[in-house]
Image (cartoon, rainbow, N blue to C red):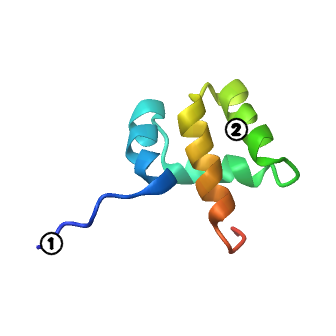
Amino acid sequence: MAQEPPSKGPASYFPSIEKTYGYPIDHWMTILDGMPDKTHMQMVAALKTDHALGHGHANALVAWYRSQKEPRT
């Protein structure tokens, strides 16, 4: 069975984010869904301030979230 290549870009942080904070990535996407009017850096700041995420992890989540073309339902 072939292994999947390692994730690149923001998704490469996902295993560490899940391990460090104890929540699946979908949890963070739901939180970001609640910030439709915020800029990238405002979203990063909210994750850092309200949820104690490190800057790199918060930035990776927001970058991936904002890169998704289809709105989440």
- Badge 1 is on which residue? 2
Q: Is residue 1 above or below residue 48?
A: below
Q: Is residue 2 visible?
A: yes
Horizontal relation, residue 1 to residue 20: left or right? left
Of the numbered discs in the image, which one, if any, rests on residue 44? 2
Q: How many marks?
A: 2
For image coordinates 68% across by 34% down, the residue present is 47
**Mark 2 residue element:** helix
For image coordinates 45% across by 35% down, the residue present is 22
Q: Position of residue 48 (x, y in %)?
A: 66, 29
Crowd around label 1: few <14 · some 14–19 · many ≥20 (10 Å) = few
Q: Amino acid at mark 2?
A: Val
Q: Is residue 28 visible?
A: no
For image coordinates 37% across by 58% down, the residue present is 7
Q: Position of residue 30 (x, y in %)?
A: 66, 52
For image coordinates 56% across by 28% down, the residue present is 54
Quadrant for residue 43, please give it. top right
Q: Is residue 17 above or below residue 62?
A: above
Q: Amino acid at mark 1?
A: Ala
Q: Is residue 69 above or below residue 53?
A: below
Instruction: Report how far apart the C-alphas of labels 2 and 1 lie in the structure.
Output: 35 Å
Horizontal relation, residue 62 to residue 19: left or right? right
The extreme front residue here reads: 9
Q: Is residue 4 above or below residue 30?
A: below
* Viewport quadrant of the C terminus: bottom right
Q: Position of residue 28 (x, y in %)?
A: 60, 46
